[in-house]
Image (cartoon, grey):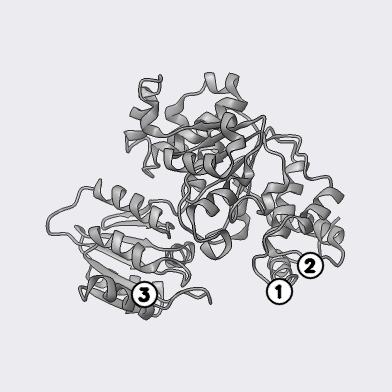
């Protein structure tokens, strides 16, 4: 079957299928998944959920599998520059041709059923994985967990990185509600790994029936458990240049061990960590001046970002400059208040998406929280970046942060 539509035509088309960008629920997608026999993948499946750190876990699992010579498929969202980034086979983005073929099959199967963009693309990913004869499939939750499209698949293990405030309009305004939704990916009879004590306790309170199936993998609790060599590797910036958090790396390692212990026992973990590929997470794109991109956009991500920035050496004459664009539905004031501790100069920007707050709106919120300091507004990331380039010195450090869109717009400037 050859699709006559280009990938861009398909993407534009499926955006029009459903009136809402997001409509949580599994009934619609399950109908088509059962029709195409996609709910039971032949490969082992790990579902990765949580508030922050999902991308790091997925990338680590991918590296573990590739170093073990296992065939792996990864499904993540959103993408930065190209839709193909969302579906990876054996470490590479899928081709337009592969996507077009899968889009055609899913479109015929749905008939007149109105699927959301994420539901449709999840079916496309599952179809591609089913046809690829893989050993491991890793599915990243898009939003929440219980009613997220990837939850139609029965996993062999799950990971919940952390639980904190995010997407409250969909998941609820309390951590208890959010924990209930996110822990909906857990299953009885399998290993369900949780990244910190706070999240572990929240899940136990929300779903006490999973008490015997939950495993806490908090980094500090692993000392003395034979992991000291791994921790030394993680702490080495030459091996872990993205400064990926110990907690997220260990979650991936523990989940991989649970399913592929024989393969894990022969791995060189230094190679595994150094070969991790991940975009937009403390990603360095320039050394002089230092330019780092980070897609973190909520309070918990802000706290982690501050920790990572503080670890960077800084010349006394240098400044830390931030280009920041944020979605209007985020806790903008709290995010800025946390990151402001390590930033000397802010450039707030407009983003080319309706959900985004304007640079002026972000600036106004910043002034309410912090008063007037060295702050500027720009109509675009490109405009702000060009202005900074005119005056930046080799001792300065530039951080581009607040949203996947902000980082994507910067990458387009390269």
Instruction: For label 2, count other residues whose C-alpha is less than 10 Å away and answer few (under 14), some (14-19) or many (20+).
Output: some
Place of residue 367 in the rendered image (x, y in percent of width and height, measured from the top left): 27, 76
Q: For residue 248, which quarter of the picture?
A: top left
Residue occupying the point 74% across, 40% down = 132
The one nearer the camera, 276 or 371, is 371
Sooner in the amino-acid sequence: mark 3 or mark 2: 2
Residue occupying the point 28% across, 75% down = 368
Place of residue 297 in the rendered image (x, y in percent of width and height, measured from the top left): 43, 60
Name the residue beneath numbered marker 1. Answer: 19
Alpha-carbon distance for marks 1 and 3?
Answer: 29 Å
- Residue 276 visible from this viewpoint: no
Place of residue 148 in the rendered image (x, y in percent of width and height, measured from the top left): 65, 54
The one nearer the camera, 28 or 137, is 28
Q: Quadrant of the N terminus?
A: bottom right
Alpha-carbon distance for marks 3 and 2?
Answer: 36 Å
Instruction: For label 3, count other residues whose C-alpha is less than 10 Å away and answer few (under 14), some (14-19) or many (20+).
Output: many
Sooner in the amino-acid sequence: mark 1 or mark 3: 1
- Residue 14 visible from this viewpoint: yes
Residue occupying the point 40% across, 27% down = 222
Q: Is residue 258 left or right of residue 413?
A: right
Image position of 22 with respect to 302: above or below: below
Name the residue beneath numbered marker 2. Answer: 114
Contact (Cβ within 8 Å) of mark 1 with mark 2: yes
Place of residue 260 in the rendered image (x, y in percent of width and height, measured from the top left): 61, 25
Name the residue beneath numbered marker 3. Answer: 362
Question: Is label 3 in a helix, a strand or a loop?
Answer: helix
Q: Is residue 252 left or right of residue 242?
A: right
Q: Which mark is residue 220?
A: none
């Amino acid at each position: 079957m050859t699709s006559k539509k280009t990938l861009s035509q398909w993407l534009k088309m499926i955006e029009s299928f459903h009136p809402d960008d997001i409509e949580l629920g599994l009934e619609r997608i399950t109908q088509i998944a059962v029709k195409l026999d996609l709910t039971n993948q032949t490969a082992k499946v790990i579902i990765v959920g949580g508030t922050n750190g999902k991308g790091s876990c997925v990338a680590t699992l991918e590296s573990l599998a590739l170093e073990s010579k296992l065939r792996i498929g990864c499904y993540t969202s959103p993408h930065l520059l190209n839709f193909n980034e969302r579906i990876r086979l054996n470490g590479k983005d899928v081709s337009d041709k592969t996507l077009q073929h899968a889009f055609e099959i899913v479109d015929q199967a749905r008939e007149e059923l109105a699927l959301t963009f994420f539901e449709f693309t999840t079916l496309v990913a599952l179809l591609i994985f089913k046809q690829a004869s893989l050993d491991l499939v890793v599915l990243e939750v898009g939003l929440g967990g219980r009613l997220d499209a990837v939850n139609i698949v029965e996993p062999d293990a799950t990971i919940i990185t952390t639980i904190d405030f995010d997407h409250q309009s969909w998941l609820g305004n309390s951590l208890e509600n959010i924990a209930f939704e996110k822990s909906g990916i857990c299953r009885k009879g399998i290993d369900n790994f949780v990244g910190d004590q706070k999240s572990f306790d929240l899940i136990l309170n929300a779903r006490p029936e999973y008490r015997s199936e939950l495993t806490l993998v908090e980094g500090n609790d692993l000392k003395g458990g034979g992991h000291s060599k791994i921790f030394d590797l993680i702490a080495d910036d030459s091996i872990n240049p993205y400064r990926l958090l110990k907690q997220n790396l260990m979650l991936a390692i523990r989940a991989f061990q649970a399913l592929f212990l024989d393969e894990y026992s022969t791995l060189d973990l230094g190679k595994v960590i150094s070969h991790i590929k991940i975009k937009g997470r403390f990603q360095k794109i320039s050394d002089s001046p230092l330019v780092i991109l980070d897609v973190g956009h909520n309070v918990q991500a802000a706290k982690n970002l501050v920790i990572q920035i503080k670890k960077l050496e800084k010349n006394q004459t240098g400044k830390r400059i931030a280009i920041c664009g944020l979605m209007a539905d985020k806790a903008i004031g709290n995010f800025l208040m946390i990151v402001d501790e390590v930033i000397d100069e802010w450039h707030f920007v407009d983003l080319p998406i309706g959900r985004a707050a304007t640079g002026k709106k972000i600036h106004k919120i910043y002034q309410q929280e912090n008063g007037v300091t060295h702050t500027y507004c720009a109509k675009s990331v490109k405009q702000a970046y060009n202005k900074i380039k005119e005056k930046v010195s080799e001792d300065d450090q530039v951080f581009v942060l607040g949203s996947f869109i902000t980082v994507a717009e910067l990458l387009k400037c390269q």
